[in-house]
Amino acid sequence: MATYTGSSLKTVLDRAYERFPRLKERRKQIAGTLSGGEQQMLAMARALATEPALLLIDELSMGLAPIIVDELYDHVRRIAASGLSILIVEQFAHEILGLADRAGIMLHGRLVHTGPPANIAGELTDAYLGADHAAP
């Protein structure tokens, strides 16, 4: 991993291994042979090495077992608690609303609802199924 922030390789690795201890255990392993969850951890560690003002996460849960998704979102929760702003795009939005300070729903490329996560939770069913989903 490399960064143009002026941080030494040791500092970058120390931070990555502190956040994601499993990566330290797998440090001799080729990235392509890591599990899907470990690859997501590596992707986040690489992004965090640049000391971003905003971390963008797209479909973190895609193709992963629920227990791994829970672990990854625990990492995201800790990263957010450190003060870093995070924008998460997730098809399974109910799973991550508990992490959010603010939430939104996009339909057909347009932001159609925004607000506190508790308010958005009620809008998700309509957004996924369409407003006419109620049984006659």
Image (cartoon, helix red, strand yellow):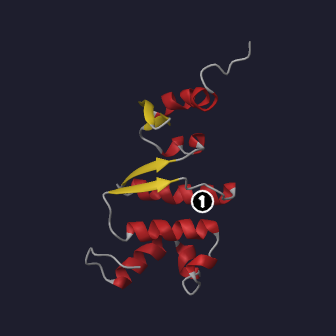
Q: Is residue 21 above or below residue 64?
A: below
Q: Quadrant of residue 114?
A: top left
Between 3 and 17, the one nearer to me in the picture: 3
**Other-residue count near label 1 (Cα within 10 Å), few / some / many at <14 / 14–19 / ≥20:** few
* Residue 111 spot, x, y in % from top left: 43, 34
Between 25 and 57, the one nearer to me in the picture: 57
| Callout 1: SS | helix
* Residue 74 spot, x, y in % from top left: 54, 57
Q: Quickly name the residue at label 1.
A: 71
For this orientation, the residue located farthest to the right is 136
Q: Is residue 53 above or below residue 24?
A: above
Residue 77: tell me if it is visible: no
Quadrant housing the N terminus: bottom left
* Residue 23 spot, x, y in % from top left: 54, 76
Q: Residue at x 32, y 66 (%)?
A: 51
Quadrant housing the C terminus: top right
Query: What amino acid does circle 1 point to?
Result: Glu
Residue 66: tell me if it is visible: yes
Q: Residue at x 43, y 59 (%)?
A: 79
